[in-house]
Image: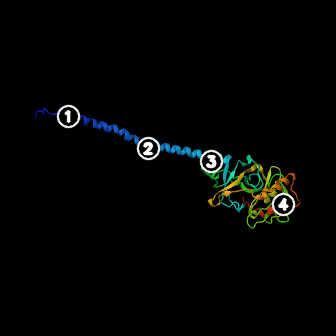
């Protein structure tokens, strides 16, 4: 049949061209679709990389804080009840003594390595176990075995004596009123016998608040230096309880240690050996009564 003279001679070629161009358009869209999985993969890689950077930075910051500023410690025993209870977690400032000296009444954490405690246990040979132990120490879930927490009673040169006629501990002849922090029912010396010492230079006389359940300077008198600890072994001052939530609170110095007479009379006391004839014997008696207790 002859073509219709009125027909548009370009109509057929245009339709064919459209049909030919359709695949080309589809092929142009496919690369865009293919890019979406690649973009998602890149985003996932970026997420894990950023997360790793954040974790590493947080760990590095925590390590720096622990080494130089503040550290978490867990209380393992009842030697400081009811001020500190077993399971409490405390923050210990490691920089406070760069700005002020140790004060009477401070609660301090110190290392007993070389004085009270046995040598520290060897590190685990397994790197994973050693890493886990370091991590738990870092966040206060466990604590090195030679760290102790006690209250400072006597500073270098102080004359610490127990007890006066009313059964109180005296420092430089000034009686301490300890009822605000002593464990209920405890006596200042818990019937452990008298002692009278002058704290040697560079050392501290420390006691637990739960006197009847604390192996402190009293029961270490036969270890040398009259049961005192080296100032340079103090890790820092415990200043706040952070766990459990029901016990969050600060740890201030009791008012009895603010007596002006304590410092005024300290200048009159010189360094020297234990004062009073029964001091060494009292130390032996204390040690015999408490040798089975290692409360920290």
Q: Which mark is residue 40?
A: 2
x 45%, y 43%: residue: 41
Mark 2 vs 4: CB contact within 8 A: no
Across and down, in percent, residue 267 comes to: 86, 51
Element assignment for label 3: helix
Label 3 or label 2, whichever comes before in sequence order: 2
Q: Is residue 6 above or below residue 204?
A: above
Most extreme residue toward the right, as rendered? 277
Find residue 112 and report its horizontal and vertical position in percent: 74, 53
Residue behind mark 1:
11
Disc nearer the start of the sequence (2/4): 2
Q: Which mark is residue 195?
A: 4
Question: Which residue in the protein does label 3 denote?
Answer: 62
Q: Which mark is residue 177?
A: none
Pointer 3 and pointer 4: residues touching (CB < 8 Å)?
no
- In the structure shown, which secondary structural element does the residue marked by tag 2 occupy? helix
Question: From mark 3 to mark 1, how far is it between C-alphas?
Answer: 77 Å
Local crowd at mark 4 within 10 Å, few (<14), some, or many (≥20)? Answer: many
- Do the residues under discs 3 and 1 have CB atoms within 8 angstroms? no
Q: CA distance from mark 3 to mark 4?
A: 43 Å
Direction bottom: furthest residue:
185
> Are there few (<14), some (14-19), or many (20+) residues within 10 Å of tag 1?
few
């Amino acid at each position: 049949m002859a073509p219709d003279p009125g027909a548009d001679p370009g109509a057929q070629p245009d339709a064919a061209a459209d049909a030919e161009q359709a695949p080309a358009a589809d092929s142009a869209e496919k690369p865009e679709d293919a890019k979406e999985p690649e973009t998602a993969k890149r985003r996932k890689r970026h997420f894990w990389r950023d997360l790793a950077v954040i974790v590493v930075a947080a760990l590095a910051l925590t390590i720096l804080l622990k080494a130089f500023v503040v550290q978490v410690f867990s209380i393992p025993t009842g030697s400081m009840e009811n001020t500190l209870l077993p399971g409490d977690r405390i923050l210990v400032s490691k920089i406070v003594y760069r700005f002020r000296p140790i004060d009477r009444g401070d609660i301090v954490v110190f290392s007993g390595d070389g004085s009270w405690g046995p040598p520290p246990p060897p590190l685990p040979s397994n790197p994973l176990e050693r890493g886990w132990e370091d991590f738990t120490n870092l966040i206060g879930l466990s604590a090195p075995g030679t760290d102790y927490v006690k209250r400072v009673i006597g500073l270098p040169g102080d004359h610490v004596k127990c007890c006066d006629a009313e059964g109180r501990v005296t420092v430089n002849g000034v009686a301490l009123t300890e009822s605000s922090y002593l464990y209920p029912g405890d006596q200042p010396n818990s019937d452990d016998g008298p002692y009278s010492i002058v704290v040697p230079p560079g050392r501290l006389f420390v006691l637990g608040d739960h006197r009847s359940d604390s192996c402190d300077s009293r029961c270490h008198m036969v270890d040398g230096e009259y049961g005192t600890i080296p100032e340079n072994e103090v890790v820092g001052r415990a200043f706040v309880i952070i766990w459990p939530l029901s016990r969050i609170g600060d740890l201030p110095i009791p008012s009895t240690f603010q007596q002006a007479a304590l410092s005024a009379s300290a200048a009159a006391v010189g360094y020297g050996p234990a004062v009073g004839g029964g001091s060494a014997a009292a130390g032996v008696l204390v040690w015999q009564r408490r040798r089975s207790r290692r409360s920290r």
